[in-house]
Amino acid sequence: MATGDLEAARATAQAAEPAQAALAARFFSEGDGHAVLLLHGLSSSPLELRYLARYLQKEGFTVCAPVIAGYSAGSPVSTMEQWVEGALREYDALAAKYERVSVCGLSIGGALALRVIRERPGAQSLVLLSLTLAYDGWAIPWYRFVLDCAYYTPLRHRYCYREAEPFGLRNEALRAKIARAMQRNAFSEVGPSTISLPALHEALRLARSARRQLASIENDALVIHAIDDETSSPRNPRFVIDNLGSTFLRTVWLDDSYHMITSDNEREIVARETVLFLRESEVVHGAQDAQSQPVVSKALARRLRQLANVGRSKT
């Protein structure tokens, strides 16, 4: 094989790596009648949500972390409208089979989750992790704010934003591991090494769309965010908290993580609080019945019994 052919083959293989990794990372686990749709971050894959997905699985939930064409890594970037359509198809497939469906989004996936919930108000609940409506964290370079303008120039086809340390991680050992992975591949368990201008442009369009009509969202909501998030500052979740129409709204602030809270030092807290919130949402809406009791850990069972006793004492 000629040198040029070898180089072309190598380039093709490297380009295919993100697609193969993303497709392999799709996660689905059959559980009880409460399904949770997990939406990962921009140009990434369900690998970002692997720990949370497995935790939910152990607690008895049906879990689906899909790969969405045009949004996930390894496929040509499509419009944010197509991202929403893809997420809605995943939601509808779950809703057709399971009694309850909750939606959880990480980073820009949180903006996507807001759009899904707005289109499907019958969802059980909403979980927003490291919600990103604006890239305004302390590690964001100044020029990122002008990249949306660059989209309308010839740079659109050539420039890619390159992720840099701390890669959303406060945990130094994990950060070093990710840094090595980023050097070897175009993909890692906390996301891609680069993000294209078209993807960033559509993400900003999605974020602007997600900001609208928040008061119309009345679903139970959980917001978890790191106070030192280097990608999206606490102004992101605060905007949503101040404007959501939810009556059952819980906020958890983390102080030992950066942006990738599903992988960082407090990932167990994130998973535990998510599970507890989802089960409490069932209690609040009387979703549990004698014929269909969800599978929960002993600790969660004790907490749910306490909540039930409190509810009975008030009646």
Image (cartoon, grey):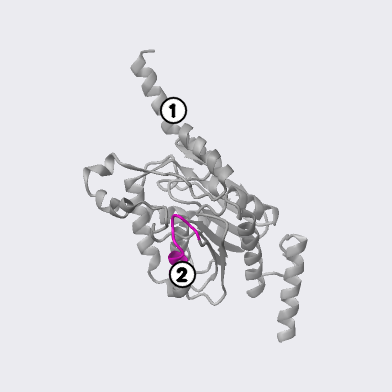
Secondary-structure class at tag 1: helix
Q: Is residue 290 above or below residue 26?
A: below
**Proximity of marks 1 and 2: CB atoms separated by less than 8 Å:** no
Q: Earlier in the sequence, mark 1 or mark 2?
A: 1
Q: Residues within 10 Å of mark 2 (few under 14, many from 20)?
A: some
Quarter of the image where the N terminus is located:
top left
Q: Residues within 10 Å of mark 1 (few under 14, many from 20)?
A: few
Residue 139: image location, x then y, percent: 42, 52
Q: Tell me if 62 is positioned left or right of 103 in this view.
A: right
Q: Can I make out residue 255 in this image?
A: yes
The amino acid type found where label 2 is placed reads Arg
Quarter of the image where the C terminus is located:
bottom right
Q: Tell me if 81 is positioned left or right of 107 in this view.
A: left
Q: Nearer the viewer, residue 182 or 99?
A: 182
The span picked out in magenta is 228-240
Residue 89: image location, x then y, percent: 47, 54
Secondary-structure class at tag 2: helix
Residue 82: image location, x then y, percent: 38, 53
Q: Is residue 186 above or below residue 103?
A: above
Residue 270 - label: none
Task: From the image, tell me which residue sits under label 2.
Answer: 238
Q: Nearer the viewer, residue 183 or 31?
A: 183
Q: Residue at x 45, y 55 (%)?
A: 230
Q: Tell me if 313 is positioned left or right of 215 in this view.
A: right
Residue 233 is covered by the magenta coloring: yes
Residue 13 - label: 1
Q: Farthest bottom residue?
A: 315
